[in-house]
Amino acid sequence: GKEACEYLISPMVSGVFAGDPYKLSLKSCFPVIADLEETYGGLFKGMLKKKNKKSGPAGPGGVLTSYKGGLINSLTDLSKKTKSVEYRLGDGVNRVEKVHDKFHIKTASANEFDFDHLVVACPSYVASEFFKDMDSELSDSLNKIHYAPAFVVGFGFDEEDVKHDMDGFGYLIPPTENRKILGALFTSSIFPERAPEGKKLVRVIMGGDRNPWIVGKPEEELVLMALEGINDTLGIKGHPEVVQYFKWNMAIPQYYQGHSKIVKSIENASESAGNLYIGGNILYGIGINDCTRTSFEIAKKLLENIKAHQ
Ligand SMILES: Cc1cc2nc3c(=O)[nH]c(=O)nc-3n(C[C@H](O)[C@H](O)[C@H](O)COP(=O)(O)OP(=O)(O)OC[C@H]3O[C@@H](n4cnc5c(N)ncnc54)[C@H](O)[C@@H]3O)c2cc1C
């Protein structure tokens, strides 16, 4: 009912998508939950039936995982392991056209390239721009995906200045509580190596689809709101020793109801263009696990297509 939606589903939706549960498509955003409902006739019926069945872990060992030193190391690792690949960084694609069966690409620094196959893994609104001349329908479909903003601020405290023991993952706040923050992650508890001995690191998340007002607010003001948001809950007694923040005006794609139609039209357009693959978080899930799965599927299809034409 309404209460389950507000206190169970809404915080989960804001924790994953920073989204509005009344706008999102259950099937596109949380296919496992949609499947529970379809198979067992209800969420709780499904959870009770599945209680004794072993479910897959969220990551290796069933704990939250990341790269030592942060997610950026997934990319630096990859570049070390793929020495024969030529990387061109910091020169975004501006325009894509199909010329003599090849993708002709123009970049921001006026470089031009021709490729047989093209994998797109940038935000959909960027791809929408560079596909305008090649295929206006594809461009329009990509542009239909709405993005929610996000503001993330990390506060580093001396442990003496935080009353809460922060023994856990953190917390998410139901939107009905009308707070300015979506929740907080106890980063130094999840990843102890991210804070020195005797210090605590909290990451506060603001914004999301229900709070587009953050886009127009100065970052310094948002930092103060974030601090105010955790003050009482965590029993903050002193000033943070470290403050780092980042604002994304278009952070997370929102799979609204009707997303599956957008997916279908983008798939059809890619199929007609030939050798075009849309990856990243645009279509099939926004979690890193979803993006990784999508990448493996694309790599497999790409190899099959290359082999088929040899
Ligand atoms: C605040 C926040 C917290 C999150 N927390 C989690 C979490 O805890 N767990 C989880 O699983 N997921 C989380 N997510 C979601 C997840 O991080 C993203 O969905 C995922 O990283 C998206 O990966 P991507 O490769 O599709 O996009 P991105 O990582 O955004 O990469 C897109 C790339 O496209 C490039 N690009 C842009 N324009 C161009 C251009 N013109 N030409 C060429 N390249 C271009 C960019 O430089 C960038 O490198 C979070 C997201 C946010 C915003």
Image (cartoon, grey):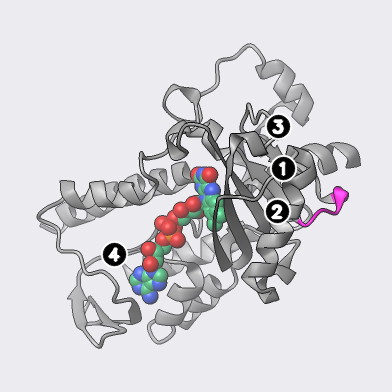
**Residue mark closest to the camera, 4 vs 3:** 3
How many residues crowd mark 3 within 10 Å: few (<14), some (14–19), many (20+)? few
Task: Give the prevailing secondary structure in the magenta stretch.
Answer: loop
Residue 152: percent from left, percent from top = 59, 56
Q: Which residue is mark 4?
A: 275
Per the model, the C-alpha gap separating discs 4 and 2 is 49 Å
Residue corresponding to mark 3 = 164
Residue at 45% across, 36% down: 196
In the rendered image, which residue does mark 1 sit on? 236
Task: Residue 217: say if magenta.
Answer: no
* Tag 2 secondary structure: helix
For residue 227, which numbered disc appears in the image?
Answer: 2
Q: Is residue 78 visible?
A: yes
Viewer-side residue, 158 vs 35: 158
Is the residue at mark 2 in contact range of ligand 1, meaning its CB lies under 8 Å from it?
no
Check the image and report above or below for 55 versus 107: above
* Residue 285 x %, y %: 52, 49
Residue under the point 40% across and 80% down: 130
Q: Which residues are magenta?
A: 176-180
Residue 286's disc number: none
In the rendered structure, the answer to whether residue 104 lies left or right of residue 196 reads left
**Mark 2 to mark 1: distance in Å?**
9 Å
Task: Work out whether residue 1 can be spotted.
Answer: no
Residue 218: percent from the left, percent from the top? Answer: 66, 74
Q: Amino acid at mark 1?
A: Ile
Q: Is residue 86 left or right of residue 291?
A: left
Q: Classify 10 Å Cα crowding around label 2: few (below 14), some (14-19), many (20 and above).
A: some
At mark 1, the secondary structure is loop
Determine the CA span between mark 1 and mark 4.
55 Å
Q: Please report the residue visible at 69 percent of the width from the left and 76 percent of the height from the top.
A: 216
Quarter holding the C terminus? bottom left
Residue 38: quarter of image: top right
